Amino acid sequence: MISSDRSASLIAAISDLQEETALALVRQRLAAGDNPLLIIESCQEGMRQVGLRYERHEYYLAGLIMAGEIFSQVMELLRPVVERQVSDRTSGSILLGTVKGDIHDLGKNIVNMLLSCHHFAVHDLGVDVSPTTFVEQAAQVQPDMVGLSGLLTSAYDAMQETVTLLRGHGYEGPIIIGGGQMSEEVCQYVGANYWTTDGVAGTELCRRLIAGTRQAAKPI
Ligand code: B12
């Protein structure tokens, strides 16, 4: 199978919630030497399709849960490969969390993994994190940057509240928002500095910020 066919099959397997097929395809792609970051990309597209099928009422909550479980298992397969392949010594620290009211964490966990591989100290506060907790932890950890994750439309307000509180308490570092529905418009509404819908690009941005090259990075 050529690479684009493997990618299409994996997207379809996730979209159809075919767990065994999806895992077999990931193993095949890894065995064929495919870049694990491209495998993550296919999985993300598969998850996006699950979301669309949920919107069309083809799937219900159970479908979202199942998709989440498949994705978690795929990540178990990919994590050691990503960890082996990334070998640079960038260092910096980030305070990361999914904002209040939102419990989606698969994307955030990918970003955690990618940044950890680049030797960032990642202080992951988990999910449904209140603005106050972000502020308390920022004061304690003194991170180089803050990353807010959120997938729900309702997360925009929680993000805005978090940014406002962080700034009000004197946090001056960059604030990056990430999640499938982020955009320039959302970024402006929230008052964040950067936005991304892609974990690999987001990781690259964090590395650039640490390297001090804060050139125009929106959109990334
Ligand atoms: C799986 C899933 C779930 C799982 C989540 C499991 C988990 N442990 O995360 C469960 C079942 C819990 C769930 C619950 C719900 N979900 Co849901 N879910 C999804 C689904 C299908 C996939 C999300 C996902 O994991 N994608 C894959 C990851 C890798 O992508 P990602 O999160 O975007 O992350 C990438 C980038 O955005 C970026 N990134 C993410 N965060 C950050 C942060 C930083 C700092 C950086 C740099 C980068 C970055 O890096 C990642 C890698 O590239 C989406 C569909 C979609 N289009 O996203 C719906 C979706 C997000 N869910 C939706 C809904 C409605 C719900 C529920 C309200 C359903 C319900 N009736 O209860 C609840 C809400 C619960 C809550 N309070 O949060 C809607 C949201 C609609 C909206 N506009 O608000 C979506 C869009 C589905 C849809 N199309 O309708 N869901």
Image (tube, rainbow, N blue to C red):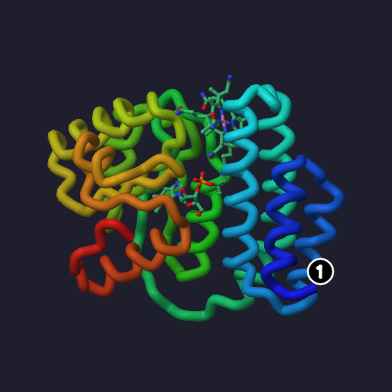
In percent of width and height, residue 22 lies at 79, 53
Quadrant of res 187: top left
- Judge whether 125 appears above or below 209 on screen: above
Disc 1, ligand 1: is the CB inside 8 Å?
no
The one of 39 and 158 positioned closer to us in this rendering: 39
In percent of width and height, residue 109 lies at 54, 49
Report the residue at 42% width, 50% height from top.
197
Q: Secondary structure at mark 1?
A: helix
In percent of width and height, residue 139 lies at 25, 43
- Residue under numbered circle 1: 28
So how many labels did they put on this image? 1
State the quadrant of the N terminus.
bottom right
Q: Is residue 45 left or right of residue 198?
A: right
Report the residue at 20% width, 53% height from top.
173
Report the residue at 68% width, 23% height from top.
60
- Judge whether 84 appears above or below 21 on screen: below
In percent of width and height, residue 204 lies at 38, 67
Label 1 Cα neighbours within 10 Å, binned few <14 / some 14-19 / many ≥20? some
The one of 5 and 106 positioned closer to us in this rendering: 5
Q: Is residue 212 left or right of residue 66?
A: left
Report the residue at 59% width, 67% height from top.
38
Kind of residue at disc 1: Gln
State the quadrant of the C terminus.
bottom left
